[in-house]
Amino acid sequence: MCRLGHLGCVTFSNIHENFVMLLTYLWILRNLIATKLVPWRTIGSWSPGRLSPHLPRMTASFVGDRLDTRPRLALSRQVTLSSVFGDGSAEVVRYRTTMITRFRDESALLLIDVQIGVDVLDHWGGPTGRRNNPGAENTMASLLDMWRGAGLPVAFTRHDSREEASPLKFSLPTGAQKPGFEPVDSDIVVKKDVNSGFVGTPLEITLRRRGISRLVVVGFFTNMCVETTVRMAGNLGFDTYLVPDGCATTNRVGPDGSDHDPELVHQMTVANLHGEFCTAMDIGDIASLVEADRPDLTRSQGNE
């Protein structure tokens, strides 16, 4: 019987356990170097202790876009490593990757309510109804062409309102898609009747079944259905990107009768979303990410 303690016993079992530990640490080190990590915080865990009950309780926690099944860890943007030894001592190292990785087949372009009825401005903004960003549709169309050209997944929400007076009803001509934004057979299309694309629809389960974990969001209106869907996407754990240039809204009349300018409403909504529920980015950066990783860009999404 060995009396030298856990680290002092030189037996076949110890050699095996130390070899497994060494391989695990080498694999982790490889990922740290490959993914350019900086300090961050703990999120979940995995324990190689299953391989041997005598190993220190190590946890390696990852959240990311790809799953490496060798040690059942995800190659990621965030990682925590910790070891707890028999004497109760612990080592904890926390990391975060800063770069935004390339959009691949786990990244869907989500177009929200690109329907003719969004242009019935007196319904949305009253007698002074007006909208901002007249170029939003051009940005959406450019992104749609880009996604289709790269063979990446595309998703649409289409609004069939519960409200009797709404122009966004399938039974009305104004409920139709705007020209150039008709879905094709391979697209994900969900019908909704409230603001969020996730409430009362199969959107979440459809995205997850397709292996989609990242969303690039555009559409109407910035402060209504776009905002509600982006908030829920972030809370559901999707890596979410908002393209403000591909969104638009109308003026809003407050309870005191104040007429709030649509550009101000738009900008305030983007400010509320960015850094908490999503990362807001311009179309140029989004386009570059279809081609390659961007180590100079940083995700800015909370609740992780």
Image (cartoon, rainbow, N blue to C red):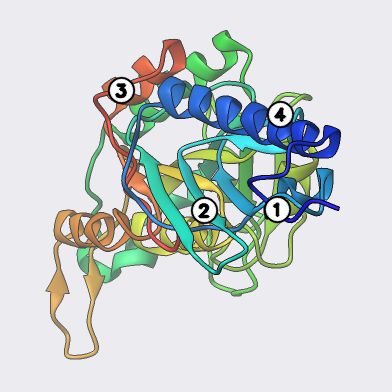
Specify the label residue 82 is tagged with.
2
Q: Is residue 19 left or right of residue 249?
A: right
Secondary structure of residue under mark 4: helix
Q: Residue at 67%, 38% (x, y): give it.
A: 73
Between 205 and 28, the one lying in front of the other is 28
Density class for disc 1 (Cα within 10 Å; few <14, some 14-19, many ≥20) is some
Per the model, the C-alpha gap separating discs 2 and 4 is 18 Å
Please report contact status of discs 2 and 1: CB closer than 8 Å, yes or no: no
Q: Earlier in the sequence, mark 4 or mark 1?
A: 4
- Looking at the image, is 285 positioned above or below residue 197? above
Q: Position of residue 235 (x, y in %)?
A: 52, 63
Q: Earlier in the sequence, mark 3 or mark 4?
A: 4
- Looking at the image, is 162 positioned above or below residue 73? below
Mark 3, residue position: 295
Secondary structure of residue under mark 3: loop
Closest to the camera, between mark 2 and mark 4, is 4
Q: Quadrant of residue 183?
A: top right
Given the image, on which type of amino acid does mark 4 rest? Phe
Specify the label residue 19 is tagged with.
4
Secondary structure of residue under mark 1: helix
Mark 1, residue position: 204
Please report contact status of discs 2 and 4: CB closer than 8 Å, yes or no: no
Please report contact status of discs 3 and 1: CB closer than 8 Å, yes or no: no
Res. 204 in view? yes
Q: Earlier in the sequence, mark 2 or mark 1?
A: 2
Q: Residue at 29%, 53% (x, y): give it.
A: 274
Per the model, the C-alpha gap separating discs 4 and 1 is 42 Å
Given the image, on which type of amino acid does mark 2 rest? Ser
Per the model, the C-alpha gap separating discs 2 and 1 is 33 Å
